[in-house]
Amino acid sequence: MAKIRDLKYNLAFNIISAVVMLLMVFSLIVSAIGYISFTNSFKREYSQTTYHMAETATLLVNGDYIDKYLETSGTTISYQKTKGYLDSFCRRMDVSIVYVIKVDESDYKSFTSVFNSVGEDTPYTPWEIGYQQDTTNEEYEMLYRQLYAGEIDRGIVYRTTDLRGAPPHITTLVPVKDSSGNVVSLMCIQRPMQELIDGRRPYLINIALSGAILAVLVSVSYALYINKEFVNPLKRINEETTRFAKENKKGHELGKVSKINEISSLGYAIDTMESDMLSYIENLTAVTSEKERIGAELNVAKTIQENSVPNIFPAFPHRTDFDVFASMTPAKEVGGDFYNFFLIDDNHLAMVIADVSGKGIPAALFMMVTNILISDRTRMGGTPAEILTFVNDNICQHNRADMFVTVWLGILDIETGKITAANAGHDDPAVYRKDGKFEILKNRHGLVVGAMEGMNYTDFEIQLNKGDKLFLYTDGVPEATDKDNKMFSIDGMIDSLNQNKEKTPKKILSGVKSSVDAFVGDAPQFDDLTMMCIEYKGKSDNSDCKKALTVDASNDSLHEVMSFVDTFLEEKECPMKTQLQIDLAVEEVFVNIASYAYGDGVGTADITVEYNDGEFVIELRDSGVKYNPLEKADPDITLSAEERQIGGLGIFLTKKNMDNVSYDYLDNHNILRMTKKF
C-alpha cells in the first residue's frame, strides 16, 4: 500500500500518466467527432431516402378523395386499390409503417387515420380507417401546423429514446394535396434505424483499441527518456535542496546535472542560491533581532497610548443627560492625535481633542505629555483659556524639539447645555441642531500650543439644547486622500455627518469612518484620524418619565414585570414593533435573574424604565451572584440548532433588538442597562 502511495507522487509516473491521459483524451475526442460525423451521415442518408419514399407514396394517394374515403369508411374500390398499393409499397421499401392521417385543423391536437400499412416483423398493429388518435406530443403538433400552413415541405422526427417497446426509427411527414393544391392530409413513413445503432459499435471499439496500443508504446519509450534526463537530475536537485533546508550549510555542488539546458541551469542556480542564502541568513539574523526588539517596544507604546485615553464605551452608562463616543486611528503604530473627556464634577464634562505635529514615537510622547498636563490642570479648575495658557507656558519651557500641538478644549455645563471653550489653532467643530443639520461652527483661534511662551487664549461659548450634537475631529478626517491625492474635504465630512445625523454618537463616527474608507479606497492612510461626538440630552423635568418596580426574583413575578413595562411603554405611545423588541429583551434578562441570580436562595430584582427625548432606558438590578452576560461569546447562528452550543442565544437576540446594552457591577449589585430609540 505504501509503494502505491509513493508511486502517486513519483515524477516519472505522473508525467507518463499525463501523457497517457492526453492520448486517451485525444482518442475520446477523435471517437466523439467520428461518432457524431458517422451518426449525422447516417441521419442525412435516412432523412433523404425516407423523404423520397414519402414523396413517391403521395403519388399513390388521390387527395381529392380523402374526405370521401372517410365518409364511406373505405368501402370504395378506389380506396381498396390505393390501400393495396400502399401495403405493397410498405413491404418493398422495408419500412415499419406507411400511414395517411387527416389532422384536426382546429387545434392540431388529434388526427383521424385514413390509410395505415404495417411492415413485416414490426410490433405495430394497423389502424382501421376512421380511427382517431391524440397527437403524440408538441413536436408533432408543431409539424402538423407548419405542414398544413405550407411553411415547410417535410417534417422529420428522430426517435431513439422513450420508444415504448418500438425500435429506434425516423418518421418523415409530407403533405398530401388535392387538385387545388390545398393540404388535405399527411403522408407519414416510419423507417427503422437499427443499421445506425449496429454500425456505431464496431467503430468505437476500433478507436478504443488503437488508442490503448498507442498509449502503451508511447509510455514505454517516453518513460526511459524522462527517467534519464528529467527524473534522476531532479532527484539530485531535490535531495540537495532538502539537505540544505535542514542543515543550512554548503554541500557538494550540482554542476551540469542534465543535457536539458533548463534543468542544468537549475542545478547551477541551486549552487549559487546556497552561497547567497548563507550570506543572507547571517545578515537577516542580525536585522531580525533588532526589528523584533523595536516591534515589541512599539506594541507596548501602542498599548500605553490606547489606554491613556477613554476607550470603554458607554463611558458613563448611568448618565442619561448626555452621550459621548470617540475613536482614534493612528497612521502608524502610534500617533500624535489624542482625545479625552472626563467629569470634573457631577455637572461639568471636560472635552479635549488635539493634533501633535509629526507622527510616530516623537509625536506619541509629546501627545502623552500634553494630555497629562491638560487633564491635571483642568481638574484644578479654571476656564479653558486659562488652562491652555498654563499648558502652553509649561510646554514651551521644555520644548527643545520645537514641536507643537493644536488643541480644542471645552467644558460642558450638563445642567444648562452651555459649553465654554478655547481653541489653540485646531479645526472648527461641527454642530447639529435638533431637526436641523450639521454645520461648521466658526470661532476665534489662538496660536498652537508650544509655539510661543506667554500667549493668552480667549474663551467662547456654545449653547447646546436637548437633541443637539457636537462633532470634534482632527485634520486627518477632511484631509484623507485617495490614490489621486484628492482630499475628502470639509464638505465631504459634513455630507457624511448629515447622512447619519439622527443616529447615536457611536453610529455617527462609524458612518464618517466608513465614508472616509470608501473615499480613500486602497490608498495608504496618510494622517492620524481622530473623532469625538457628544449628544446633549439634558435632564428630564417630567416625573412620569421614569418609574421603578421592585419584585421577588422569581418566575412568578414575570407577569407583573411585563405588565409594568408595557403600561409605561403604552403611556409613551411606543410603536408596537419597538414594544415587542423591548418586551423580548426584558423577559430574557428577568428570567435569567429569576433562574440564576440567587441560586436556591431568595432575593429581589429592581426594574427601572425611563423615557427621555425619544429614547427608552430600561435598567434591571439584582444583588445576586456577580455575572456579566455580555462576556459570553455570541453563538454561531450559521450552525443548525443541533450543532450550536446551548446558551447565549437569548442575550444575543437582546443585543440585536436593543440599540445599546451595557453591564456594570456597583455596590454588590449586577446592573444591566438597555436603551432603545424610536
Image (tube, rainbow, N blue to C red):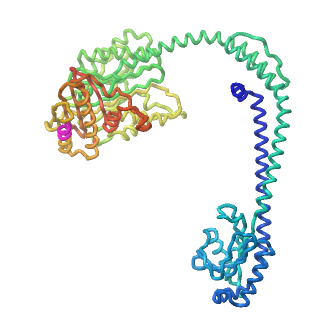
Q: Is residue 155 left or right of residue 455?
A: right
Quadrant for residue 546, please give it.
Answer: top left
Residue at 76% in and 39% down:
21
> Looking at the picture, does residue 440 appear above or below residue 49?
above
Name above or below for residue 598 compared with residue 137: above
Q: Which residues are magenta?
A: 557-564
Q: Is residue 252 magenta?
A: no
> Which of the 4 quarters of the picture holds residue 197?
bottom right
Q: Position of residue 36 (x, y in %)?
A: 76, 56
Residue 260 horizontal/vertical position (percent): 83, 26
Q: Which quarter of the image is occupied by the N terminus? A: top right
Name the residue at 28% across, 31% down: 323
The image position of residue 375, as x and y in percent, is: 30, 17
Left or right of 109, for residue 389? left
Q: Nearer the viewer, residue 600 or 143?
A: 600
Write down the quadrant of residue 498 in the picture.
top left
